[in-house]
Image: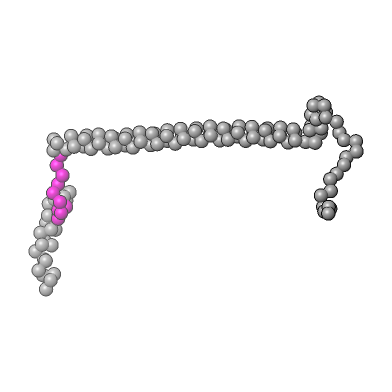
Amino acid sequence: MATSFFAPAIARSREAVITRSTQAVLQLVPELKKEEGEEIQTRAFLFILSGVFGIGLLSLLLINTLLTQDAFVLQRLKHNVNITNDQRDAILREVAQKSSPTYLSSQAIKLGMAPAQNPQFIDISEKSK
């Protein structure tokens, strides 16, 4: 029953295929025809697309430049930390050298001090009554 209902449409479509073999029998959308405004819209689209691409590229360039500047600042700060650590180590070495017993005794002799020949010690542990 259903096939007999569609039989006239099938016959018409076969006739249409025979007569117009280059065109589709059923068209869901109308054929696209080139209009005058279409080329302008394509140019505008390409211009907008290239503008967005250019702005994105420039923003990436700006971000990378800022990151590179921060890297240079970080490198300079690391260099300053190394110099400060070297200076601190030099000061600690100088303090250790000047606090050594041999240096202290030589400085005492230069000041006119003499080492004691008979050292005497005070004993405070004994209680006197």
Which quarter of the picture shows residue 36? Answer: top left
Q: Is residue 27 magenta?
A: yes
Specify start and end residues of the magenta stretch as a single range: 24-34
* Observer-nearest of 15 and 46: 46
Residue found at x 12% / y 51% = 19
Q: Is residue 108 magenta?
A: no
Decide: is 108 above or below 23: above
Decide: is 23 above or below 70: below
Q: Quadrant of the N terminus?
A: bottom left
* Observer-nearest of 27 and 74: 74
Q: Name the spot of residue 118 as percent of width and height, x first.
A: 90, 38
Q: Is residue 80 left or right of residue 5?
A: right
Q: Name the spot of residue 58 as percent of width and height, x first.
A: 35, 33
Q: Main secondary structure of the magenta part?
A: loop
Decide: is 75 above or below 9: above
Q: Can see residue 17?
A: no
Give the image's coloring scheme: one colour
Q: Is residue 115 left or right of residue 87?
A: right
Residue found at x 32% / y 34% = 54
Name, please, the residue furthest toward the bottom. 1
